[in-house]
Amino acid sequence: MSAIAIKYNDEIVDLVTAEQRGIEGEEIVLDNSPESLDVLRHSTAHLMAQAIKSLYPDAEFYVGPTVKEGFYYDFKTASEIGEGDLKKIEKQMLSFAKKKYKIEKYEISMDEAKEKFKDDHLKLAVMERIKDDTISIYKQGEFEDLCRGPHLPSIGLIRYFKLTKIAGAYLGGDSKNEMLTRIYGIAFADKESLKNHMTMLAEAAKRDHRKIGNEMKLFTFREEVGAGFPIWLPAGGRLRARLEGLLFKAHRKHGYQPVRGPEMLRADLWKTSGHYQNYGENMYFTQIDDIEFGVKPMNCVGHIKVYEDELHSYRDLPIKYFEYGVVHRHEMTGALHGLFRVREFTQDDAHIFCTVDQIEEQIIEVVDFVDKIMTTFDFKYNMTISTKPEKAVGDALVWEKSEAALISAMEKNNLPYTIDEGGGAFYGPKIDIKILDAIGREWQCGTIQLDNNLPERFGLEYNGENNEKIQPVMIHRAILGSFERFIGILTEHYAGEFPMFIAPTQVAIVPVAETHKEYAKLLSDKLIDINADSEIYAKNDSLNKRIRVAEKTRVPMIVVIGDEEIENKTISVRDRRTREQYTISEEEFLKLIQTKINEVNF
RNA sequence: GCCGACAUAGCUCAGUUGGCUAGAGCAGCUGAUUUGUAAUCAGCAGGCCCGGGGUUCAAAUCCUCGUGUCGGCACCA
């Protein structure tokens, strides 16, 4: 196979450029390597632009880069383009590709380029961002586009691609600018890979928590209730209660005290905390008896009031409060997305009040807690430390100590982490926990944030060894982030097949005939005694039908009860995945369930 | 919030260029059947076609304003 580009000093250079510059290097052939795909997809973006230009001659083009999942091109045309037009554009692309136009390249000066594209205000906008004096132009057939490259030698090499999405996007990614049309696409070197990719997308769609949540009756949303306000259905309620229960126990073991602050607090407090000024747009307010109240968007203030309830000695620290705190945030309509982004959600929120010297050990403990939970759910995760941003408040020395403590906590425990320089909150540095689900997608959930701002604003203090007043450090931390989002992620991670310890129903009991119902009920009661939920499928349907229904509900375990089982005190267990059956004694069965429920240890 | 698409029974979806009483499957209810590991049969019931306003002899269908959902963008203390 002939080369499509070369690698020269770690730079991918296309053949036409290599020839112009008279350089040689390692050959890159057309395959599915990252380098090769990058060139291929970039050229596919140009091919798409060429097709769009021929179908919509007034189209003006902004930028068309490759991204993680393919490529896109932003453009503008007077005609309305919808999803249905993608096929048409694809067809035009194929017909151009068949003509096997060579992709040529030449350079002109910036002034010439501005003259050449003077009717295309988007291209002019692109050039505004380029500092060089010369501009390279890539040409295929009649179509010309200014571009840095690299590109394929010919568009004839582009065969296996698909346009996937059409959407709006702001010029330059700035919401103050005009909205352009963006079309996303994907391309591969061979047919098989494209097919696999499309299959993978379909797999991901099957796992969509909104779809599974509906099928399994976990939660719902209703127009008349309002956007972004989830309704938890019985099955979801059971799942959530299990998660809450497990986590409650774990918090107690880790030395946290359960507390609870009010849902609404006087607006004056939000002024003291700074939320009124900085976050007010996202808050819900109400006025009663001439007093303004704000519904809490966070739980910190409530916990501060708990702290203020008594005087504290350095001997009491660290003090750890936790709460399943319900918060309301007025997220923008377009941001709402199933359980991932809602307007009312419950955080597994905790605040640790400690001395500066205790930061490190506290961080280590929290990180350890996080690790236990993530491991239990088979999540891989990574952590990012975000450091002091430009706009920051608080003592420089405390900032320094805090950041050092975070890094040292990671180093001492040999935990991998990355640093986001300047990415911290204005009040302190933080660690974000990003989890990777079963199909490799990344989610931001938990966060550990140091805060010197709120203790300062509320004048928090404790008595030191010499009876002096010292300001404590506050650590905000959430491990799941919110129950809503975390359950959404779990749903997609497990594709709805939850492990026994959080499944909404642990066991489906299917009595063979009417006469076995009574025994089924007895078994169900025994399961309740060991904290397992079961459901009896005793409807007047065929056995096959009831097993089918039970399978579809994704219950981890199905047992069938008939004459044989009752007589021998055994249980016939059906494995959902393999569809295989085995028989064990009732005693063994109950023990098995109990073990599976208790195999969690956060 | 912005660009675009969509909204019909509890769920998944049909419904022609505006034209008769808006259909199907699943779920539900009533019967018959009492079942040994992925759909037994028959019958019944179920809809302000998302909401308001308009165009028209006539609107689920066309226009308009809302609301909600979806795909992106922007946002994400």
Image: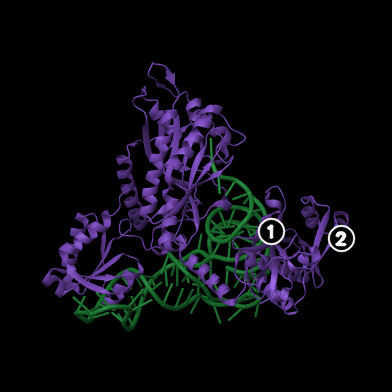
Q: Which residue is mark 2?
A: A116
Instruction: Say if A317 sits above or below A130 in the image.
Output: above
Quadrant position of the N terminus of chain A in the picture:
bottom right
Specify whether residue A119 is in view: yes
Q: Chain B hue?
A: green
Same subunit: marks 2 and 1: yes
From the viewer's perspective, is residue A239 above or below residue A396?
Answer: below
Name chain A's colour.
purple
Q: Which of the chains bears the disc numbered 2? A: A
The answer to whether one can see residue A296 in this image is: no
Q: Amino acid at mark 1?
A: Asn
**Image x and y of residue A423, in percent:** 57, 41
Helix, strand or loop for disc 1: loop
SS type, badge 2: helix
C-alpha separation, residue under disc 2 versus residue under disc 1: 33 Å
Residue underneath mark 1: A9
Query: To which quarter of the image does residue A471 belong?
Result: top left
Is A76 situated above or below B58? above
Query: Outermost residue toward the left?
Result: A567
Residue type of the residue flagged with mark 2 = Lys
A97 horizontally vs A524: left or right:
right
Q: Mark 2 near mark 1, Cβ–Cβ under 8 Å?
A: no
